[in-house]
Structures are given as structure tokens and as C-alpha cells.
Image (tube, helix red, strand yellow):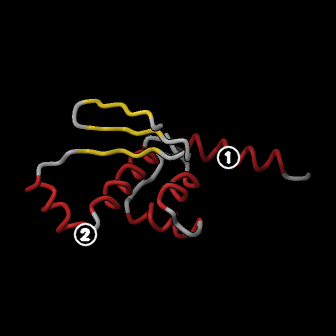
């Protein structure tokens, strides 16, 4: 039997199949506007959740791919680029990565 949690206008259902079903209530007029813009409203909401989770560092590109059922890493990278979902990558990060590559390279 699925475990359900109800908080405000959100319903989260945990299933044994290792998937979570989330239901949200949106007023009809707003739902129609969003569906008119996005087409498949459920897919648009799922994509928005994936993008925000990726931006916040909560999930990886591989998890975005799995969540959205994308076929390849390249399709995932393309999706994230279109969504302008970039991680903060500072000069310090770059310098650390370069140092790690140098340390790992044979002398």
C-alpha cells in the first residue's frame, strides 16, 4: 500500500516501485493557461522540478536524464542548456580541476 503525505495543496505518494507520484492543485483558469503554453502540463511541471533540482545541486545530470526519460547524456545536456540551468563554476573551481588533472597526469 502506498504511503501518502498531504501538505497544503500537494500530495506526495511513495510507491514500492521506487517512484514518487506528486499531485498538485492548480486553479482551472491557471491550469488552462499553463497547458496552453506548455502543451503537456504534467511534463512541463516535471521538467521545471528537474531544472530547479539540478540548479540547486540537489540532483546530477544523470538523475535529470533518468527523471525525464532522456535517451542520452547529450540530450540531457541540450535540455539543461535550453533551460539555462548552469551550475556556478568559479575560477577557484577551474583552478582546482586543473590542479587535479595535472596531479593525475603521468609526469
Residue 79 position in % (x across, y down): 44, 65
User: Which secondary structure lies at badge 2?
Assistant: loop
Q: Residue at x 38, y 57 (%)?
A: 47
- Residue tagged 1: 97
Which residue, as the protein is rendered here, is positioned at the far right? 107
Q: Which residue is mark 2?
A: 39
Gap in angstroms between the C-alphas marked 1 and 2: 41 Å
Q: Residue 89: x percent and y percent?
A: 51, 47
- x and y percentages locating residue 75 in the rendered image: 52, 69
Residue in view at x 82 percent, y 44 percent: 103
Closest to the camera, between mark 1 and mark 2, is 2
For image coordinates 85% across by 52% down, the residue present is 105
Left or right of residue 80: residue 101? right
**Is 27 situated above or below 71?**
above
Depth check: 101 or 56 in front? 56
Q: Residue furthest front?
A: 1
| Residue lying at 17% horizontally and 68% vertically, measured from the top left | 36
Query: Relative to 73, is 25 on the left or the right?
Result: left
- Residue 11 position, x and y percent, is 31, 38
Closest to the observer, 29 or 13: 13
Q: Label 1 neighbourhood size at 10 Å, few (<14), some (14-19), many (20+)?
A: few
In this picture, residue 50 sits left or right of residue 7: right
Q: Tell me the quarter of the picture where residue 24 sits.
A: top left
Amino acid at each position: 500500500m502506498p504511503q501518502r503525505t498531504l501538505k497544503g495543496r500537494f500530495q506526495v505518494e511513495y510507491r514500492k516501485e521506487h517512484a514518487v507520484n506528486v499531485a498538485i492543485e492548480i486553479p482551472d483558469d491557471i491550469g488552462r493557461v499553463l497547458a496552453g503554453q506548455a502543451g503537456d502540463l504534467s511534463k512541463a511541471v516535471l521538467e521545471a522540478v528537474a531544472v530547479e533540482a539540478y540548479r540547486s545541486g540537489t540532483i546530477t545530470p544523470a538523475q535529470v536524464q533518468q527523471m525525464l526519460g532522456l535517451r542520452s547524456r547529450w540530450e540531457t545536456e541540450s535540455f539543461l542548456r535550453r533551460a539555462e540551468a548552469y551550475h556556478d563554476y568559479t575560477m577557484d573551481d577551474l583552478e582546482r580541476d586543473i590542479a587535479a588533472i595535472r596531479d593525475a597526469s603521468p609526469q
